[in-house]
Amino acid sequence: MNDYIIKTTTEDMTKQLGERMALLLRQGNVITLSGDLGAGKTTLTKGIGKGIGVKRTINSPTFTIVKEYMGNLPLYHMDAYRLENSDEDIGFEEYFYSDGVTVVEWPSFIEEFLPAERLDIVMKRSGENEREIHLYPQGSDHEFICKELYR
């Protein structure tokens, strides 16, 4: 498994990375976002949303678990944090194998439900605004996305 590392130094750069990523995404793509609070998971998701044409404000779905946004593709934004120690299946497959793109924050809490093919992203703070973004593609479709972003 290849590890691609992209560094951003501002919040705007993190959003722009999401926008670039969005141009490469297709229906059924699943992206997982891991990292501490404040690592930039929702910021990257905002960029993805903008890149696929979402007009609404994107914010963390902490209290609703899943937020749905319409753009050129549907964007399903999940926050699995509240599902810690829960084995409840809220119909994840309906999102993962759908006509949209699914972004999952805190994926470790629903690991057993995640599809094998996905793009795992681990975000680390390396300064006040600096981020180290590790991309771990699972499957050739996601490998292609990483290679394009890494150019």
Image (cartoon, grey):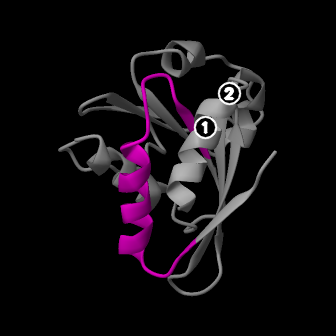
| Quarter location, residue 105 | top right
Q: Amino acid at mark 2?
A: Glu
Please state, as top left, top right, bottom left or bottom right, where the N terminus lies in the image.
Answer: top right
Residue 54, compared with residue 50, is above or below; it is above
| Quarter location, residue 38 | bottom right
Q: Residues within 10 Å of mark 2 (few under 14, many from 20)?
A: some
The label on residue 117 is 2
Q: Residues within 10 Å of mark 1 (few under 14, many from 20)?
A: many
N-terminal label among 1 and 2: 2
Report the front residue among 34 and 25.
25
Q: How many marks?
A: 2
Residue at the spot of label 1: 142
Q: Say whether marks 1 and 2 touch (CB < 8 Å).
A: yes
- Rendered location of residue 78, percent (x, y): 50, 36
Residue 41 placement, left or right of 58: right
Residue 82, compared with residue 17, is above or below; it is above
Element type at mark 1 = helix
Q: Is residue 82 visible?
A: no
Question: Measuring 45% from the left and 57% from the top, which residue is drawn there?
Answer: 44
Magenta stretch: give its range: 7-32
| Quarter location, residue 17 | bottom left
Report the front residue among 11 and 108.
11
Residue farthest to the front, as pictured: 151
Question: Measuring 29% from the left and 40% from the top, which residue is drawn there?
Answer: 52
Q: Amino acid at mark 1?
A: His
